[in-house]
Image (cartoon, coloured by chain):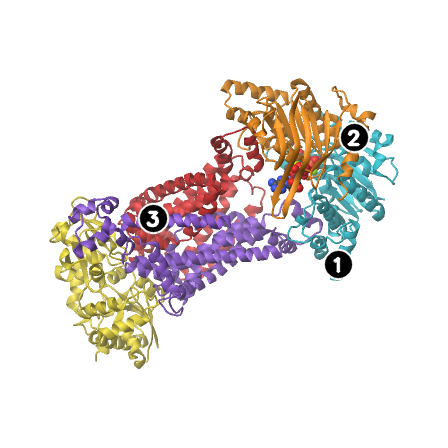
Chain colours: A yellow, B cyan, C orange, D red, E purple
Amino acid sequence: DSVKLQLQWVTQAQFAGYYVAKDKGYYTDENLDVEILPGGPDIAPPQVLAGGGADAMLNWMPSALAAREKGLPVVNIAQPFKTSGLMLTCWKDTGITGPQDFKGKTIGVWFFGNEYPFLSWMSKEGIKTDGGPDGVTVLKQGFNVDPLLQRQADCISTMTYNEYGQVLDAGVKEDELITFKYEDMGVATLEDGIYVLEDNLKDPAFADKMVRFVRASMKGWKYAEEHPDEAAGIVLDNDATGAQTEAHQVRMMGEIAKLTAGSNGALDEADYQRTVDTLLGGGSDPVISKQPEGAWTHQITDEALK
Amino acid sequence: MSVIEARGLNLTFQTNDGPVHALKDVNLSIDRGEFVSFIGPSGCGKTTFLRCIAALEQPTGGSLTVNGVSPEEARRARAYGYVFQAAGLYPWRTIAGNIKLPLEIMGFARDEQERRVNDVLQLVDLAGFGKKYPWQLSGGMQQRASIARALAFDADILLMDEPFGALDEIVRDHLNEQLLKLWARTNKTIGFVTHSIPEAVYLSTKIVVMSPRPGRITDVIDSPLPSERPLDIRDSAEFIEIAHRVREGLRAGHVDE
Amino acid sequence: MSVIEARGLNLTFQTNDGPVHALKDVNLSIDRGEFVSFIGPSGCGKTTFLRCIAALEQPTGGSLTVNGVSPEEARRARAYGYVFQAAGLYPWRTIAGNIKLPLEIMGFARDEQERRVNDVLQLVDLAGFGKKYPWQLSGGMQQRASIARALAFDADILLMDEPFGALDEIVRDHLNEQLLKLWARTNKTIGFVTHSIPEAVYLSTKIVVMSPRPGRITDVIDSPLPSERPLDIRDSAEFIEIAHRVREGLRAGHVDE
Amino acid sequence: MTLAFAALLVWILGWAVNGWLARGPMANTPLVRLAVPLIFGLTILGVWELVVRGLNVPLVILPAPSLIAARFAGSLPVLWEDFSQTILKGALSGYVIGCGAAFLMAILVDRSDFLRRGLLPVGNFVAALPIVGTAPILVMWFGFDWQSKAAVVVVMVFFPMLVNTVAGLREATQMQRDLMQTYGASYWQGLVKLRLPAAMPFIFNGLKISTTLALIGAIVAEFFGSPTVGMGFRISTSVGQLALDMVWAEIVVAAIAGSVFYGIVALAEKTVTFWHPSQRR
Amino acid sequence: MRSLVAVLTVVAALVVVWYLACIPMNIAGVLVEAERAGATVTPTDGAERRATSGIVLAAKNSFAIPATWAQERPRLPAPDQVVNELWKTTVGMNITSKRSLVYHAWVTLSATLLGFAIGTGLGILLAVGIVHSRVMDMSVMPWAIVSQTIPIIALAPMIIVVLYSVGMQGIVPKAVISAYLSFFPVVVGMVKGLRSPDAMQLDLLRTYNASSAQGFWKLRLPASMPYLFASLKIGISASLVGAIVGELPTGAVAGLGARLLAGSYYGQTVQIWSALFGAAILAACLVGLLGLIERALLARMGMAR
Ligand SMILES: Nc1ncnc2c1ncn2[C@@H]1O[C@H](COP(=O)(O)OP(=O)(O)OP(=O)(O)O)[C@@H](O)[C@H]1O
Ligand SMILES: Nc1ncnc2c1ncn2[C@@H]1O[C@H](COP(=O)(O)OP(=O)(O)OP(=O)(O)O)[C@@H](O)[C@H]1O
Ligand SMILES: [Mg+2]
Ligand SMILES: [Mg+2]
């Protein structure tokens, strides 16, 4: 059986589990032929899913829930990432010590579905994001950490496993920075879950396919956690751009392992509820307007983890 | 027998500034084998009349027959060879290729094409230039090639719209002489537009003088000159007299410029 | 006193196909108030010679003086009115605007400009057409406007390169007559290129016959015709004789076409 | 399925009406000249609407025109804000700076044959640098606000404008130049009275090409970093939010703005180069 | 020959300007690095430095100037860095390697050529329709202009998703985008070209009673060739841009666009610039190639003088 998986971003260690599963033959063992479609800027995985270009996608839960509200019934069938890696990294010399100091500062944020956690957090803190004097000025941050390095922004969004390392790579010392983990701020939302279309799930053949897919993928993840260097190597082999460096991927794999640790693939309901609460708490401009129904299921993981 | 027969021909163009009466009440009959020149000031409808004969323009009134049928039918029967003011050779074809063009369109056999191209090249004194491109030839030679093109498919009627307008006097004299010889040999019917009085008088058996606004025929002069015409016939008293009559006719229609 | 004086003038163009000898050993002197026509087959260097006089082309040998100084200096002193073969009016200016152009450049006062424009428009029979754009006028009228433009600033020397080439015979006759009158009135020195033998003979006090490859003067004919010349002087025996001599001179240089 | 069939009917009908209009006696009146493309556009919209509804195309793939229109009408303030950020600030200022600089440069270049020979090939090379590569660099240099968008537009319009203007300045015929020479005109007189007017059709050609480039440049540059306003920003974030109706509403704004901008330049061209044969019909 | 000298002079001048520009552009970054390495820089205070212009900084810290041309991640890489990178990733590497720019250029090129072929074919067909049908002329032409005001990069992800949903992946979506960009110049040029024969040439064919197919093959098509090539040259560079644009959302798998993206993602300025120049060089080669074909074809047709 063939499965197409749409990633959220370009090939990198963030998706190591899937590449490892493919490389190590875990998918073949399950009688699956998996094609991994790398993502990129401006391509929305839910859209690909809706168009039938993929069977499953990886997505952050806020974006998936928003899509659900927009009438695209996507369902979380597995959640390999337990912990959020999202952070806000600021220059210390701007005088920022806590969220209350953000007022009047310029902050780089990723959009394209990744802005939801930030907006929720700000509305929880009661900070406006319209650029006024008692709010923050939001920039749509590009793909890299230049806005911070060039001082175009006081803070930028970073992932523990990627951009933060890039900032350090640029020669910045950790004590020059101050970092806010969303996890620590209590506004963490679930990242990198596996989603499929609700209708498809009713088809037993498809459900069975997903069971095998999740099972093999989790096997890949656990292998990757234990053998980060080898996993990074596999990712590098699969990178068609030839632009990734080994050191970078090895470090990323190390950080990713921390995030996937503690997840067996099944969604933790408490995490889910915290995500939903964070998003619903979005004040005047909430990401989702009502408690979602049926946005996740244990149907697959129950079967897969038997 | 009259080859071209116009009766009360009218043609009005609808333009933004209102209608233009390009031809008004034109009556003319041309016999087989005649050489008819059309002369008149700019805008008097010479070109328009020639285009009507060749069915490139639709008269708005009157009747016009060619070989007893409508111009349209005559065109379908490929009765015309038309030579435009500029040579109008296709720059991407050699001289031979240009002459071959109508033959290809009319579906002549390949070896027949070759034969005819060689024949007409000879006829206009361009043998050996077939492989050249138009821009490698002088203006006079190009004009001869364009005449050859019109001759190649042996149309009954040759219509020429100021074919020598752009050439200098000496080349023009030379081509006039050659055209006369050709006409004598092939006995085609020729309609010929010109601005030059000596040219008209030298070439024609019949000179049609036209005048503008509205375009109409003011005089038709049958030439008494012999069919054998050396170039210096132009210094003869007879010639000068006809030229004088043409000039008077022209001047009459030219009061307003 | 001679206004234009050429001694052993040579001009060779360097082209991709090797040098072209456009002018070879040209000797000519033109007196004040003369009307000199240049006639010759295409490519014999008529235009080139005129351009040398107006300092638009640099001779490669020999000497050429205008009013005793170099053509370059004469040009700076604004000695020339030049009329090109095509009217060459600027399409974005009205007729009046076109005539005003040299006046603006030479810094005439505004009311002086108006006055002169009106004068020359009158002179060439275009009064009332000043506000029209060039494309709204017939070819003949455009050509007259371009002559008016050359006259407006009262240059000593008028150089005209086939100004009437594109016009029909009647309009041409008319303009020829007017040009002669103008010349008689203003007593300018005129250099005039033409392809037409009657035109050259009718207008000139001196006819320069040229021949090509290399471009050189083959004959200089001083006209014995009186300065008062009605149009029908062209039927006189004297006229025909000069025309004949010009034609012979031309034919001699024309063997190869 | 019936709706899809209706779409086919609408298509045939629209085409037939246009055929009748275009061949009819009124074909050259301004009214018909305007009506025919409009009918064609409406036909396409009708077909689109019917096909989307008939085949149940998911909203997140392609919204129906009626939805787009509703979103357009409902989001006017946002659309206006985006429009003024991207078009009025980014595109227009870049357009003016870029075209102006190119114009001055062209006059400089035109004075020296050496510069012209040297600069134009290099210019063509630089013009071939793809915008998706230059935009991030310029955003890095000029910051996130409209200034960097203007910079992208400058880079995009500079060379087309330069090439056209230089070609235009050489457009005056030899005869027209010679005429100036016989008057002993100075360089500036020749430039102002001859070469600039003669160059106008080319200059306007460059200006027209630049209008669409300016628009596209400003919008695309916003994909590589922007404040939270602007058409490019809205398009890219709306795709992420699967608000496809908003995306299309912005595209409609872009198309209208582009057509109007183009139309204004074309109108200016018509008045300035009224004398050119192509404008005279 | 004279042109070559002129071009080289201009290029040399640009390179000098470029090197000079590197100094103020990169000096701030260099000084930060120098400070970390233990050097003393003026002014010592980071905040004050940020407020000082690059030129002043360079003047006060002239020792750091050479370093502005050799930074690892400069704001503006020096020309030799770019050339080095280009050399390293083209000549210096096996062309089948994913790190070779030649490999990526080939990926982009294949999409470009396919898109160019589609766009050109479509453009020519449309032009033929417009020239032969008044209805098409009046209704399609204005919309063709409007279509060019739509920012393609906004449509690109959607085009790709739509094509995904009908099962097309890989080269085709990119080619479609590149075709979208290249068809317009071809339509405009070709319409102009097919209409270039004057009334006289058309009338000539009428006197032969030629069919409109004969008129097309024997007159309109050959007459349009110079126009076609002029617009093909514009079209092929547009195609290349289209292919690169199409590579961004398709997941940056491979190709020059992917290189640009990856370079941008990881802040590898030198890599961005070399990909950028790679693209421009590719465009120049394609245009040059078309120029050669044009010369050969027109020479065969006798239209080159
Ligand atoms: N297609 C057309 N539409 C409108 N008016 C036309 C058209 N063709 C010719 N005319 C007008 O008809 C009149 C006769 O034109 P025609 O070309 O027959 O003159 P002509 O005698 O050949 O002049 P010339 O010596 O300048 O060639 C002119 O007034 C011209 O403006
Ligand atoms: N700029 C130039 N470069 C090279 N050759 C030239 C140039 N101008 C003229 N010639 C050549 O010099 C010769 C004389 O040209 P010129 O224009 O003076 O002839 P002309 O007598 O005016 O001919 P026409 O009657 O055709 O106008 C021709 O052979 C022409 O090809
Ligand atoms: Mg005519
Ligand atoms: Mg000449």
Q: Classify mark 1: residues with Cα within 10 Å, few (<14), some (14-19) or many (20+).
A: some
Q: Given this view, does label 1 or label 2 mark the residue nearer the observer? A: 2
Q: Is mark 2 within 8 Å of ligand 2?
A: no
Q: Is residue B46 above or below residue B128?
A: above
Label 1: which residue? B114
Discs 2 and 3 lie in a common subunit: no
Q: Is residue B53 above or below residue E73?
A: above
Label 3: which residue? D72
Given residues C34 and D1, the one toward you in this image is C34
Distance from Cα at disc 2 to Cα at disc 3: 82 Å
- Could you tell me if residue D178 is visible in this image? yes
Horizontally, is A100 left or right of B69 in the view?
left
Q: Is mark 1 within 8 Å of ligand 2?
A: no
Q: Given this view, does label 2 or label 3 mark the residue nearer the observer? A: 2
Q: Chain of mark 1?
A: B
Q: Classify mark 3: residues with Cα within 10 Å, few (<14), some (14-19) or many (20+).
A: many
Q: x, y (%) of residue D92?
A: 36, 42
Distance from Cα at disc 1 to Cα at disc 3: 68 Å
Q: Given this view, does label 1 or label 3 mark the residue nearer the observer? A: 1
Q: Quadrant of ligand 1?
A: top right
Given residues B32 and A220, the one toward you in this image is A220
Q: x, y (%) of residue E235?
A: 48, 54
At label 2, the amino acid type is Ala
Specify the label residue C243 is tagged with.
2
Discs 1 and 2 lie in a common subunit: no
Specify the label residue D86 is tagged with.
none
At label 3, the amino acid type is Phe
Distance from Cα at disc 1 to Cα at disc 2: 44 Å
**Label 3 SS:** helix
At label 1, the amino acid type is Glu
Q: x, y (%) of residue C252?
A: 78, 38
